[in-house]
Amino acid sequence: MKKMIIRGGRPLYGEIKISGFKNAALPLLYASVLAADVSVIGNVPRILDVFRTLEILESMGAIARFVDGNTVLCDTRFVRPCSSPDGLVRKLRASAYLLGAELARFGKTRAAIPGGCSIGRRPLDLHLAAFRTLGAEVRESEDAIGATAPSGLHGGEIVFGKVSVGATVNAILAAVGARGETILRGVAREPHITDLCDYLTACGAAISGVGSDCLRIRGGLPLHGATYALMPDMIEAGTFLCACGAAGGEICLRGAKAEHLSLLCTTLREMGMEIRCAPQQICASRPGPLAPFSLVAEPYPGFPTDMHPQFAALATGIPGCSRIRETVFPDRFRYVGELRRLGATIEARDGEVMINGGSSLHPGCVFATDLRAGAAEVIAALSIPGETVIRDAEILERGYDALPGKLRALGVPVIAEF
Ligand code: EPZ
């Protein structure tokens, strides 16, 4: 297990480049299977979940690799269906997208149950219901899922009773491969869903309603490869904005798209941060003490659940009581115990976390229990004078590209074993 040591207690100064978005990269890489052609995807982050996805695709017969810094070439012409490696598939949640991609292209699929961050129950019932609506026969076992559509998928109407990013991705992939028209109601509206639709449109798919909660897809069209550049990582940008709020100083995030972070930036401004947005950049500073806040984490365009732990860490340094109600993953509170190890007065109950901030935290040793918990611990460590050790820090490599180097570029002394 790798560790990261952060010597905190000093303000951040400098500029970093925000990488491409993990949660946009992963759907697009699996979606490239549909085109059975060569795609070139730009602005791909060099993170563990991308490397694992490339390895999965290559083990299935694709050529899928970085051809320069952040550009990936995906040649999926010779992909073999139902051949994904169980061990790798179990390591990440996004490998669930193999199901929709294979069903759309081959009319059959089989993959191990996907893994992912331990942030509570992560069922696949909405994914599988969407496949069944489009004519697939789905078989579930304890450790794998299979589905077939002997006469191919057909169009239909999919109505989501609950917003699910992953189920929306899989339903879109299946619908693009289904003969006829599919209407999808109650879909997730995260910006990375728009990225996926824009890539598939570039491949020849016919998708309307992009960005709304209702998509209309005319499926079964001939598809081809495309060249596409990913959106910037809105959660990475949000994480660094919280880091600046916790440690102080003045930072600029090159490549960040403020339109993806409007609610988050408004919240930080209301708390007392100075946030200046330009078309391809966000700059931030903390001119004085911040005010406590109350938030609800919910699907986009609401406050992103993937920023909940980071804001809780920020709140530990703000005098007063701050609250975050978590409506997407009601169990994503494992980070709370870790912040307590650093002296935070924080409590989670009934899907809500309360933080009594202001009392100074002390250095210590914490564990990155999941990706965004690790990010929260980094933010807390930045506000603490002295050395804080984050163990299992390799989890951060799953979703943050070159995090130690970016922290050093902002003046933070970091020792990292990755
Ligand atoms: C994606 O997870 C992201 N992961 C998560 O980011 C993110 O937190 C989440 O979307 C919400 O934005 C990737 O993109 C790889 P969901 P996903 O399906 O698709 C329930 C990170 O840190 N649900 O939108 O798994 C589910 O249990 C990660 O980058 C069902 O009940 O999330 C949850 O309560 C963490 N049945 C809610 O819906 C289903 O079939 C939302 O989950 C599917 C989901």
Image (tube, helix red, strand yellow):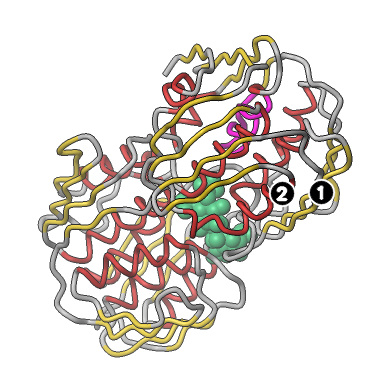
Looking at the picture, which amino acid does disc 1 mark?
Answer: Arg
Inspect the magenta stretch and tell me whether residue 374 lies in it: yes
Please report whichever mark, 2 or 1, sits nearer to the chain's N-terminal start.
Answer: 1
Residue 142 shows up from this direction:
no
> Who's the residue at 34% across and 78% down the image?
175
Name the residue nearer the viewer: 350 or 87: 350
Question: As drawn, is 232 to the left or to the right of 212?
Answer: left
> Who's the residue at 31% across and 37% down the image?
51
Q: Is the C-beta of the residue carrying label 1 under 8 Å from the nearest atom of ligand 1? A: no
Q: CA distance from mark 2 to mark 1?
A: 15 Å
* Helix, strand or loop under label 2: loop
Name the residue nearer the viewer: 315 or 186: 315
Q: Is residue 416 above or below residue 323?
A: above
Looking at the picture, which amino acid does disc 2 mark?
Answer: Asp
Prevailing SS of the magenta stretch: helix
Residue identifier under label 2: 331
What's drawn in magenta, residue-wise? 367-380
Q: Is residue 272 above or below residue 407?
A: below
Q: Quadrant of ligand 1?
A: bottom right
Q: Picture quarter containing residue 327?
A: bottom right
Percent from the top left, x then y, of residue 132? Answer: 43, 78
Percent from the top left, x then y, of residue 118? Answer: 60, 42
Residue identifier under label 1: 323
> Who's the residue at 81% across and 28% down the image?
344
Q: Picture quarter containing residue 297?
A: bottom right
